[in-house]
Image: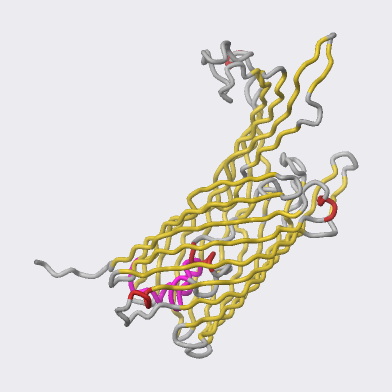
Amino acid sequence: MNGYGIGNFQSWQSPSQGGMVSLGLTPSFQNGVSLSNPSTWQQLKYTHLSISYYGLASNLKEMNVKNGFSTLQSGQLIIPIKQSSALGIAIHPYTYQQVALLDTIYPDMLAFGDTLDLMRGYYQAGGIIALDLSVALTLFEGNRIGATFQLLFGSTRQHEKLLLNQVPITETSRMSYSGLNIDFFIKRSFSKNLDIYFQLGIPVEPLDVVYTDFYPFDDTNKNTYHDYTYGLLNPGYDFPHPQDTPNAKQVRIKNIYQPASLAIGLSRLLSERFQLSLEMKTSKDFADYPIDLPMILNHRINIKQVASIGCIWLPNNLSVLMSDKFTIRSGLNFKKYIMDGWDSVQKVKIQNVDPITEFGGAIGFGFKFKAVGNQVDISYYYGIRHHPSTLRHDFGDERVQQLQVGISLADLWFVKRRQR
């Protein structure tokens, strides 16, 4: 998924959200609170600093190929103000773009009476980062709103290599991104135990990219950089020398990604400690297919539809028993990815008939400690991703596993302390 379009989008920003496979609208962190929905933050009594870590592993069973990576999932600070408003700032990955492909179909080549070892490779690392600035307000009893301004930035670096007799001929390029989105949130309480949530996402500045293409070179010292270093293990200098190459070609490609989304969520407390939630979301990229943007798989995700159902067993804040400090979460979700592409030979747009679909489930646990409500959360997700029939021969079904771990530390701000 990292190779489609601008990459694989982050599904969850916290283990509490991931444990319920929540879309971020309904409460998953504490009673009445979601870390991803500013319209619920007014119910927090303390300022919260949350940090979480994320790991993913996937397996293409038919091809016997495994892949995985781990990274910081998010860092977030939420400041409630008199339980009527709140401010927040967060930073987290927006898309993941790590890709590594090897082509060994033609392992050798006969040239000038000599047999040359040949192997091609494509490597990509990096992604897009989101900086979220959020505000929440209470309009009147039972009605709360929130907004998140999402600044997108980041870069990816691509390496295309042709290994000729174990000497890599390398061409490097870089893409730097910038864009701005805004999300609006509404929470409406119909009763003490029933709440409905809405989210609308629109682009303010569509995503742009500055594409820089560097001159190819022989990476004689095999350190992946075009430099002057003489390698002892791999004797020799890169050719040509960096000062002998033309300047890199740079071009700005505008409006490569223009997302809009609409989501609805419903949560109901079936008892004082048990909550059931239902969420649905659809998002669409309204940008034209960026035919000038280099994409290794020549496809992008144009429409994404997600539905999830989750439940949470809340802790008892009045109990002194350790067993009553635990939170238990679980959920199921279904995702559908509709793609389009571009045929560079026929110069026509490609619309896949069969979408990529994914069905999965998660379980998560949390533990609250200390009077202010510090919390540790962990969640595990397992899903099966079915690729479309046009690609099934290449990929088959994909097994996806995700592990998330996070901690949230709370403190009381904007209160005059007693002097000792």
* Residue 342: percent from left, percent from top: 82, 46
- Horizontal side of 68 relative to 287 (left or right) equals left
- Horizontal side of 54 relative to 209 (left or right) equals left
The residue at 60%/36% (across/down) is 157
Question: Where does the magenta region start and end?
Answer: 29-47
- Residue situated in front as seen by the camera: 322 or 217: 322
Is 45 above or below relative to 339?
Answer: below
* Residue 128: percent from left, percent from top: 57, 48
* Residue 391: percent from left, percent from top: 81, 50
The residue at 75%/55% (across/down) is 397
The residue at 76%/49% (across/down) is 62
Is residue 276 shown in magenta? Answer: no
- Residue situated in front as seen by the camera: 408 or 77: 408
The residue at 66%/63% (across/down) is 260
**Is the magenta region chiefly helix, strand or loop?**
loop
- Horizontal side of 242 relative to 59 (left or right) equals left
Is 205 above or below relative to 47?
Answer: above
